[in-house]
Image (tube, rainbow, N blue to C red):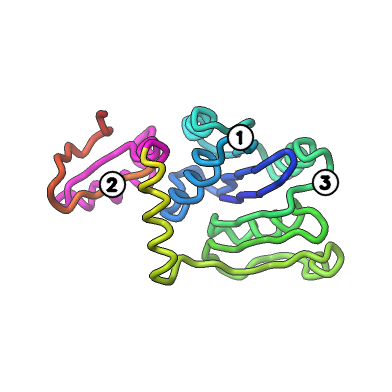
Amino acid sequence: MLAAVTKSPGVMVLDDVAEPGPPGPEDVILRSEVVGICGSAQVMVTDPVAGRRDLAARMGAERVAWGDHDELLTAVARWTRGHGPPRVIDTTGDPAALAQAAQMVCSAGRVVVVGMSAAAPLRSGIFPEKEIDVVGSSCATAADFRAAIRLVQAHRDAIAALLTHRFPLTRVREAIECAAGSHSGVVKVLITVSGHKASGGIRHE
């Protein structure tokens, strides 16, 4: 996922992954925070999977899109009226995403790297040319986890919309296979340890 935060027109979320498949664990908080919790903020989401684009639209995304590298850059430029978003957050784990984020972000903007990847192929000159900041971020402290818990507690409906499948711990292998994309319609897979009824299929509300 590449998420770009803007003041005008608003907030943009880009699920820019090399292969179709469910987003990573960090996307639950990011997507719920940016799409389901922003209220009046405007959101753009790109994702290779049509079902997840539909979900983003239902959760409040102003625009959803998908395409190749150039098509996404064009879509972002049009959406931001040619300025580019001042914030881009990369959680893809795709080495090519950092270069794309650097191209998307506006001059003097910031790229936040959350996804883990191998060596990233990009031209380093773009950093001083556009005067952009590149910073790393990780949910690594007790305070971070407390903030995440408060976020989930305050926005249960937005989080629940992402939990499409539920499995008991005894079926963890099946859950992992489902999360890897073997089941259609998967967004997030929840493994229950105890105290919850789990069928292992699509969650029934």
Disc 3 versus disc 1: nearer the observer: 1
The amino acid beneath tag 1 is: Ser
Where does label 1 land, which residue? 40
Q: Residue at x 49, y 38 (%)?
A: 36
- Secondary structure of residue under mark 2: strand
Where does label 3 land, which residue? 83
Where does label 2 land, which residue? 190
- Taking depth in this image into account, of 156 and 72 the one nearest to the observer is 156
Q: Residue at x 56, y 36 (%)?
A: 39
The amino acid beneath tag 3 is: His
CB within 8 Å, label 3 to label 1:
no
- Taking depth in this image into account, of 60 and 52 the one nearest to the observer is 60
Disc 1 versus disc 2: nearer the observer: 1
Q: Residue at x 45, y 51 (%)?
A: 29
Q: What's the distance in space between the residues labelled 1 and 2, CA to CA?
A: 29 Å
x and y percentages locating residue 133 in the rendered image: 73, 67
- Secondary structure of residue under mark 3: loop
Q: Residue at x 54, y 29 (%)?
A: 57
